[in-house]
Amino acid sequence: QLQLVESGGGTVQTGGSLRLSCAASGHAVGSYTMGWFRQGPVKDREFVAAMRWSGSGVIYADSVKGRFTISRDTGINTVYLQMNNLQPSDTAVYYCAAHGSRTRITRIPGEYNSWGQGTQVTVSS
């Protein structure tokens, strides 16, 4: 498993932007697939984006496609989620997660075995 620490959450107005960071540490970081999930009030944990650590296999939830971008910096073992044109419906706690497969890309939270502590994103109208 990896240790994951998110940062970068906050409060923005509708249409604003935020960039979340997820610092990963542990053995063989490059052999994982990384994902971002979110959980709003009284909602289940929802898939947002995922990618292989190699940078390939990028997928997004339909609700964020065209607005959010997942990326990574292999030099500092950090994954990012750039969020643009934020809407009140994006308000949630955002979690970084790691899935112990170099190849499989998945949207299913239960398949990820490492999670960060979460960072709050609030979008005001």
Image: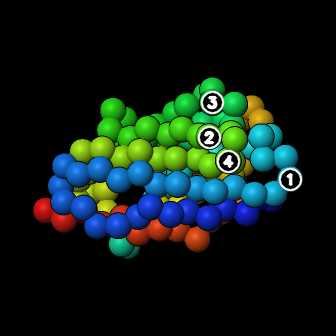
The span from disc 2 to disc 1 (Cα, nearest Å) is 17 Å
Q: Residue 10 sits in which quadrant?
A: bottom left
Q: Residue at x 62, y 64 (%)?
A: 5
42 left or right, relative to 88: right
Q: In the current view of this chain or complex, which residue is farthest to the right?
A: 27
Give how far across and how far down residue 53 sits, in percent: 69, 37
Q: Secondary structure at mark 3?
A: loop
Labels 2 and 1: the sequence-earlier one: 1
Q: Residue 11 sits in which quadrant?
A: bottom left
Q: What amino acid does circle 2 point to?
A: Asp
The span from disc 2 to disc 3 (Cα, nearest Å) is 10 Å
Residue that label 4 marks: 76
Labels 4 and 1: the sequence-earlier one: 1
The span from disc 4 to disc 1 (Cα, nearest Å) is 14 Å
Residue that label 1 marks: 27
Q: Are marks 4 and 2 in contact (CB under 8 Å)?
A: yes
Circle 2 or circle 1, nearest the eye: 2
> How is the rendered protein coloured?
rainbow
Q: Nearer the viewer, residue 62 or 1?
A: 1
Circle 4 or circle 1, nearest the eye: 4
Q: What amino acid does circle 4 point to?
A: Ile
Q: Is residue 36 visible?
A: yes
Residue that label 2 marks: 73
Q: Are marks 2 and 1 in contact (CB under 8 Å)?
A: no
Which image quarter holds the N terminus?
bottom right
Q: Secondary structure at mark 1?
A: loop
Q: Residue 12 sits in which quadrant?
A: bottom left
Dot 2 crowding, Cα within 10 Å, few <14, some 14–19, many 20+: few
Q: What amino acid does circle 1 point to?
A: His
